[in-house]
């Protein structure tokens, strides 16, 4: 049963957007199965998969209710996709840009979209897992695609090895015009502090707003700090530490060789797994 944990955690994480909650869902389902006083289950994998997915949907519904009172922007909890991780199938983890887009969907739409687009389930399989009709599965997927402007899972743009170094050097130079040249005209910078760490309450939109904000926070708080380049949810990222503790994860999405989105994770609760 433990051999299924990485796959099951991947299902739960993609639906929830929270790694810590995903691990709890999988653990609860496994414990319940161990404690069952019934006969042997014929297809253990199918039973666990169905149980985890439906439990994750319920947990996602609760999470969305909590988000209504969240201070500032809510971003998914990032996970490392560089190096080994015993709790996750890295290839099954969605890109961070898609995880952010999925925040537009309700829990069931999100589950159907993920099962179809990420795990290549047929509608008949989705219907069985979620206990809905095949027709309903198709309708839910159609509504999900419309909400996402028919976005499909795209391969994340590969980043040149020195790109993040160039970004940091440009910010340290305090040359705003040069920094703006690295940014897409459609740049958006989103910060998540969760009310527990300083962060912009609203997204910064456009090259002028974004460059002023980025230059200001980097040169005030991070100019003298060492950074670590890594990969988070298949996107290039920078880690900043304070006294050995991860305090900032900055995730980059590129399009047409320019930075299209920057996601700044400052909420310490969502940095726990990365910090390990």
Image (spheres, rainbow, N blue to C red):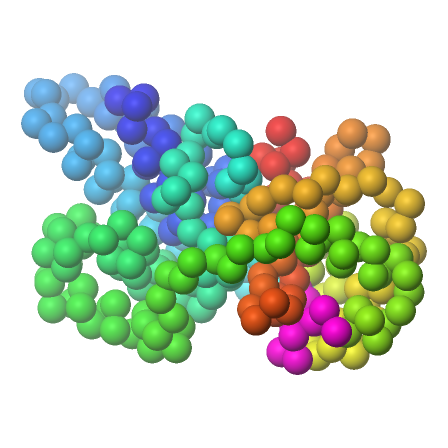
Residue 118 against residue 28 in the figure, above or below: below
Left or right, 72 with reference to 136: right
Predominant secondary structure, magenta span: strand
Residue 35 against residue 205 in the figure, above or below: above
- Asked where in the image residue 214 lies, by quadrant, the reply is bottom right
Residue at point 51% right, 40% down? 81
Left or right, 36 with reference to 245: left
Residue 56 against residue 103 in the figure, above or below: above
Residue at point 83% right, 31% down? 243
Residue at point 38% right, 28% down? 27
Residue at point 11% right, 62% down? 133
| Residue 40 pos. (x, y %) | 10, 21
Q: Is residue 189 magenta?
A: yes
| Residue 42 pos. (x, y %) | 8, 27
* Quadrant holding the C terminus: top right
| Residue 11 pos. (x, y %) | 34, 44
Q: Is residue 217 magenta?
A: no
State whether residue 31 appears in this view. yes
**Nearer-the-camera pick, 56 or 2:** 2
Left or right, 193 with reference to 91: right
**Nearer-the-camera pick, 185 or 40:** 185
How many circles with numbers are drawn on the protein?
Answer: 0
Which segment did they paint magenta?
181-190
| Residue 231 pos. (x, y %) | 58, 44
Left or right, 120 with reference to 21: left
State whether residue 204 appears in this view. no
């Amino acid at each position: 049963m433990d051999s299924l944990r990485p796959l099951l955690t991947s299902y739960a994480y993609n639906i929830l957007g929270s790694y810590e909650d995903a691990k709890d869902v999988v653990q609860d389902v496994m414990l319940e199965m161990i404690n069952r006083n019934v006969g042997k289950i014929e297809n253990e994998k199918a039973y666990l998969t169905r149980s985890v997915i439906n439990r994750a949907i319920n947990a996602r519904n609760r999470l969305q209710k909590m988000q209504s009172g969240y201070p500032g922007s809510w971003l998914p909890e990032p996970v490392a996709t560089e190096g080994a991780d015993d709790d996750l199938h890295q290839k099954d983890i969605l890109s961070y840009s898609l995880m952010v887009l999925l925040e537009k969907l309700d829990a069931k739409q999100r589950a159907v979209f993920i099962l179809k687009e990420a795990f290549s389930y047929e509608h008949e399989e989705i219907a069985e897992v979620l206990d809905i009709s095949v027709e309903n599965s198709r309708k839910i997927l159609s509504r999900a695609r419309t909400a996402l402007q028919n976005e499909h899972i795209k391969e994340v743009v590969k980043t040149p090895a020195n790109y993040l170094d160039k970004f940091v050097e440009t910010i340290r130079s305090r040359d705003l015009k040069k920094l703006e040249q690295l940014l897409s005209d459609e740049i958006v910078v989103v910060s998540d502090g969760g009310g527990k760490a300083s962060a912009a309450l609203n997204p910064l939109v456009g090259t002028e707003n974004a460059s002023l904000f980025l230059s200001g926070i980097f040169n005030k708080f991070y100019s003298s700090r060492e950074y670590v380049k890594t990969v988070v949810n298949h996107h290039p990222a920078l880690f900043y530490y304070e006294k050995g503790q991860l305090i900032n994860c900055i995730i980059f999405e590129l399009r047409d060789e320019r930075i299209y989105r920057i996601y700044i994770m400052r909420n310490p609760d969502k940095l726990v797994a990365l910090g390990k």
